[in-house]
Amino acid sequence: MTVLGKRNVAEEMAPGVFRIEVPTPFHVGSVNLYVLIKAEEVTLVDVGPLTEEAWQTLNEGLASIGIGLEQISQIVLTHHHVDHVGQLERVRRASGARTLAHPQAAPYVQMDEDFMVYHDQFFKELYQKSGVPEEKLIIIAKFQKLMKTFSAPSQIDGLLKHEQVLPLFPEWQVLYTPGHSQSHLSLYRAKDRVLIGGDHIIKHISSNAFIEPPRDRSRNRPLTLVQYRTALQMCADMEIDQVFSGHGERVTHHRELILSRLQKNWERTDTLRRLLASGEKTAYELTALLFPTLYEKELPLTISETIGHIDLLMILHQVEVEERDDVLYYHL
Ligand SMILES: [Zn+2]
Ligand SMILES: [Zn+2]
């Protein structure tokens, strides 16, 4: 506590855009919330997890720019992950603000019981097909426990779509940037070429394209890494001077960063092909080989990485798959 209170001061990133860095209990570290101010209107982008520390820091950050929770007119969610949305209900109650988000965020934010059953069933089947041992399926229950610990059921009042303008803040445009999450939105202000990028573009860590169940239950799962690469490419094609991310520092050379992320994908597909040269393997076996120190602790994250890269190889017909006893085996 050498710099007492220093972190709880909001930083002005661009005219009318303030960042509040809020602690989380997760491995990722702190999460960045953004406050947009225009005349009498205040928009809060993301709210942080449901912890006392996050609550305190949010309030102190707002106070440092001279506003109170009750002045927030709307909350925009970049995506439904608990580090970004956990204390939504608490902020809504204190502020009376409306929540705006992508439709895919709704079942997670509401903690819809029926959806959670479907969600667990989806992962049970995915993991079984991937060759995950039965005793490891406990991680599915862990996800719900995490949600219940660091968030509370809440509501979304308005849905946001790709390329619409942000209500009350017409100079901000909403962009759908799926891949890291099916509900992921970014906000773009053309006049000073600023992107509020959530977990889509992060400087110090490469975002994971988490596998998630499809929106339409009768469809196949979305190819999240393919989506993610498309959404990255979309941003590379845009004129952006600064990205304000959900974690870490601002990004100023977004094209270089995007190019290096896209390149990394091909390096990983090369590694997978090398691993498959010795014979067929399941996604779980490949995950253990790709992430030997991480896969046990971070299975959802690491298996998403593996499956995403297998998807790329499958699209290019560089890998074949065979199903036996409900398990998928990949080979060259
Ligand atoms: Zn996230
Ligand atoms: Zn995050």
Image (cartoon, rainbow, N blue to C red):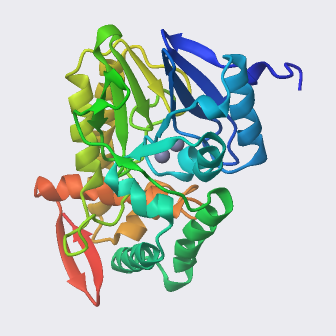
Compare residues 326 and 126 and report the one nearer the observer.
126
Percent of width and height locating residue 251: 44, 19
The furthest residue to the right: 2
Q: How many marks?
A: 0
Residue 235 lies, with reference to residue 210, above or below; the image says above
Residue 267 lies, with reference to residue 296, above or below; the image says above
Percent of width and height locating residue 158: 37, 47
- Judge left or right: residue 134 versus residue 91: left
Within the image, what quadrant is residue 163 found in?
top left
Percent of width and height locating residue 157: 41, 50
Compare residues 119 and 52 and report the one nearer the observer.
52
Residue 131 lies, with reference to residue 111, above or below; the image says below
Percent of width and height locating residue 100: 41, 43
Q: Residue at x 77, y 41 (%)?
A: 53
Which quadrant is the N terminus positioned in? Answer: top right
Q: Residue at x 21, y 30 (%)?
A: 234
The furthest residue to the bottom: 325
Compare residues 294 and 17 and report the one nearer the observer.
17
Within the image, what quadrant is residue 254 found in?
top left
Q: Residue at x 30, y 45 (%)?
A: 178
Compare residues 47 and 305 and report the one nearer the observer.
47
Which quadrant is the C terminus positioned in? Answer: bottom left
Q: Can residue 67 be seen in this snapshot?
A: yes
Q: Can residue 289 be seen in this snapshot?
A: no
- Judge left or right: residue 1 versus residue 170: right
